[in-house]
Amino acid sequence: MTALKTAYVSLGSNKGDKLKNLQEAVNEIYQHIGNVKLISKVYQSPSFGFESDDFLNTCLIVETGLTPSQTMKALLKIEKALGRTRRKNGYEARTIDLDIIYFENEVVHTKTLQIPHQEMSKRRFVLQPLNDIANGFIHPELKKTTVELLEECPDDSVLQPIRIWLKNPKKKYCFSNLNYITIEGNIGAGKTSLARMISRDFNAKLILERFADNPFLPKFYEDKKRYAFPLEMSFLADRYQQISDDLSQLDLFKDFIVSDYDIFKSLIFSKITLQEDEFKLYRKLFYLMYKDIAKPDMYIYLHQNTERLQENIKQRGRDYEQNIDNAYLEQINAGYLGFLKSQPELNIKIIDISNLDFIKNRSDYLKILDELCSFSDKLV
């Protein structure tokens, strides 16, 4: 999964419906650049360097997988879409003005990009909203905090906060009515990646299946018949211990729980891997252990075709998975679909992601969130 970095972006508008321009820019930044973490107050400020109508200004903190150059290109594209054409020289009224103030602690000096923004320390309309959301951030070149830069700023313009707040676009995604979400799927479907992304973006407690340390897993792929029963039994015990501990430990600082596995996957896989008599014993133990475990409020199943699954398995490069054959993956998929049909009490959402790449393409990730939000609304 792409490592995210933090960008600090300044927004301004003094032409047309200024507040609407800012909101549309925030929406576009969320759609094309990354998760909007914080939005400052909106300030009314006099035009700077030329005579024109007053501006409305704000600042954002954005988490993005883009580089500084890619982020700036995306901002310029958003400006153009919202009706601005940049002039090479001079100031003018504008529907929207978007600038990178900081990008992590990076320093970039090229013909097309200057980070930190070279004029920021002289502009109160940048520093005042930036101070709302990043007052302790230290300028990587000047070695001063935003508070210190604001105190020393030579610009004596008077800024007035307005009483209308911009809306964070991520608020439309409705997980507030859920306490526990499970994401399931075949080997290589992307369930762990999606769980991580939702946890990161929506302040959820993350529960990830512990499989990396299971000593039977590599052996199972070498000799399925011999190691199937000890593998499934070890998973049964470990999943029980983990899910019991994690679901019982309340985290007051998280809004809900998201997990990359459901306890019933033990039955799905064991039915495929075990002999009939072994499975009967296993199933009896399963129901004895799991009878009181909480069920998820939403059960998400990510479906991918076998070709895509094999591509993902090869790409993540776990040695013991490289010889998994198509027939085994198709058995697992059939096992999941059979299980889902037999569980009318679960709130199941199946999403076909065979033609999506939600890790690399933010638009695909947002499509999945839109589907989940629509489904979540129906559960209220």
Image (cartoon, rainbow, N blue to C red):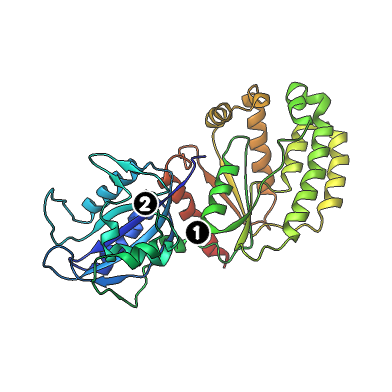
SS at badge 1 = helix
The residue drawn where x is 16% and y is 51% is: 86
Residue bearing mark 2? 102
Position of residue 152 relative to residue 228, above or below, is below
Position of residue 84 relative to residue 335, above or below, is below
Residue bearing mark 1? 373
Q: Amino acid at mark 1?
A: Cys
Q: Position of residue 310 (x, y in %)?
A: 57, 28
The residue drawn where x is 28% and y is 53% is: 99
Residue 330 shown left or right of residue 56 in the figure? right
Which quarter of the rendered picture does the C terminus lie within?
A: bottom right
The residue drawn where x is 26% and y is 60% is: 122
Position of residue 218 relative to residue 292, above or below, is above
In which image quadrant can residue 18 be found? bottom left
Q: Amino acid at mark 2?
A: Tyr
- Label total for image: 2
Q: Residues within 10 Å of mark 2 (few under 14, many from 20)?
A: many
